[in-house]
Amino acid sequence: MSHWLTDLDARDRALFARLALTSSAALSLRRFWVMLTHLGGARASLGLAIVQVVIPGGSLAMAWRTLCLLGLSHLVVQLIKRSVGRPRPSAGESSAALVLIPDRFSFPSGHACAAMALAVGLASAIPVLTMPLLFLALLVGFSRVMLGVHYPGDVLMGQAIALISAYPILG
């Protein structure tokens, strides 16, 4: 690994160590982050994308574009995850994950990607909700670090993949 990647990895790990909750954190705090993190899961992402069919300002076309965005961004995430193979923080750090880990690879974050893809897709249908949706997507990404399942860089890359994937679909 080149020097700048080694340095970036060290900074990512140090930031993770400062942010991640431990099992001794208050139960209410852990529940809050767990609730948020599930918004980036498959059930919530797909369900909220489909809801665009019935919400005011939504349409079948927008729901379909959001589903396509989720699919494309998920494909990119999975290709990168399997190619890079970065282990999750709980695999080598002194912290344990506070939620179920979906697979053994950390980079990039699929939950952070899905939450951002969903936020962008919904915001394109209902522009007045853009800022709250983006803020919520950022919190979902942050929850992955707080719960000990991703490094901050994993989250940022997942969110970037969603934003880049949105251009050909929503642009």
Image: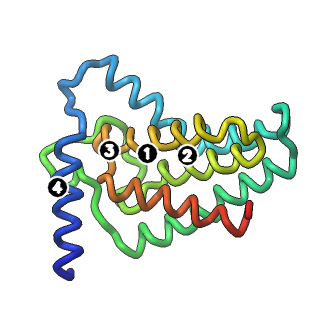
Question: The residue under label 3 is which amino acid type?
Answer: Val
Per the rendering, the mark at residue 92 is 4
Image coordinates for residue 136, horizontal then vertical, percent: 52, 36
Mark 4 vs mark 2: which is more N-terminal? 4
Mark 4 vs mark 3: which is more N-terminal? 4
According to the picture, the residue beneath numbered tag 3 turns out to be: 145
As measured in the structure, the alpha-carbon distance from the residue carrying label 2 to the one carrying label 1 is 8 Å
User: Which sits in the foreground, 149 or 1?
Assistant: 1
CB within 8 Å, label 4 to label 1: no
Residue at the farthest bottom position: 2
Label 2: few (<14), some (14–19) or many (≥20) C-alpha neighbours in 10 Å: many
Question: The residue under label 2 is which amino acid type?
Answer: Ala
For the C terminus, the image quarter is: bottom right
Q: Nearer the viewer, mark 4 or mark 2?
A: 2
Where 62 sits versus 164, above or below? above
Q: Secondary structure at mark 1?
A: helix
User: Which sits in the foreground, 145 or 94?
Assistant: 145
Per the rendering, the mark at residue 30 is none
Mark 4 vs mark 1: which is more N-terminal? 4
Q: Secondary structure at mark 4?
A: helix
CB within 8 Å, label 3 to label 1: yes
According to the picture, the residue beneath numbered tag 1 turns out to be: 141
Question: The residue under label 1 is which amino acid type?
Answer: Gly
x 62%, y 65%: residue: 165
x 55%, y 46%: residue: 115
Q: Secondary structure at mark 2?
A: helix
Image coordinates for residue 39, horizontal then vertical, percent: 54, 37
According to the picture, the residue beneath numbered tag 2 turns out to be: 115
x 22%, y 54%: residue: 91
Where 8 sits versus 22, above or below? below
